[in-house]
Image: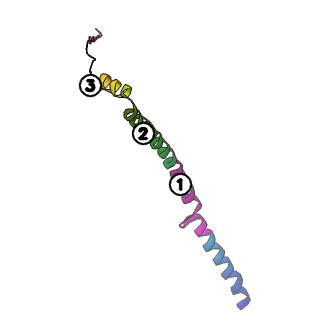
Amino acid sequence: MGIRLVPVVLLALLVALHAQLWLGRGSLPQVAAMQQKIEAQKAANAQVRQANERLASEVQDLKEGLDMVEEKARSELGMVKQGEVYVQFTPR
């Protein structure tokens, strides 16, 4: 009786380990899903990093020179220099 008990216990242990591998916490499907989430987050981080670099460059330009300030005033606020004439074309 004791001789048959050892293989049964070992088989049950093997089944429990396989169940953990395929169905439990840290299972293969769960790891694959987490890897996809990590890749998506890395892509989002890269986009945000690029936007941050662009904004940092713009801030640096605004601090260093008046060219960027003048460009912003013209494009966003519609300002013109003294002696200039503002002309706007409207499509028909």
Give the foreground label among 1 and 2. Answer: 2
* Nearest to N terminus: mark 1 or mark 3: 1
Give the foreground label among 1 and 3. Answer: 3
Q: Give the range drawn in magenta.
A: 18-39
- Give the alpha-carbon distance from disc 1 to disc 2, as whole Å: 34 Å
Choose top left, top right, bottom left or bottom right for residue 90: top left
Residue type indicated by callout 1: Ala
Is residue 1 at least partly visible in the picture? no
Q: Is residue 62 left or right of residue 2?
A: left
Give the position of the C terminus as an image quadrant: top left
Q: Position of residue 35 (x, y in %)?
A: 55, 54
* Residue in view at x 37 percent, y 35 percent: 63
Q: Residue furthest top?
A: 92
* Residue in view at x 37 percent, y 33 percent: 62
Give the structural element (helix, strand or loop) at label 1: helix
Give the structural element (helix, strand or loop) at label 3: helix
Residue 56 shows which numbered tag?
A: 2
Q: Position of residue 29 (x, y in %)?
A: 56, 58
Q: How is the image coloured?
A: rainbow
- Give the alpha-carbon distance from disc 3 to disc 2, as whole Å: 22 Å
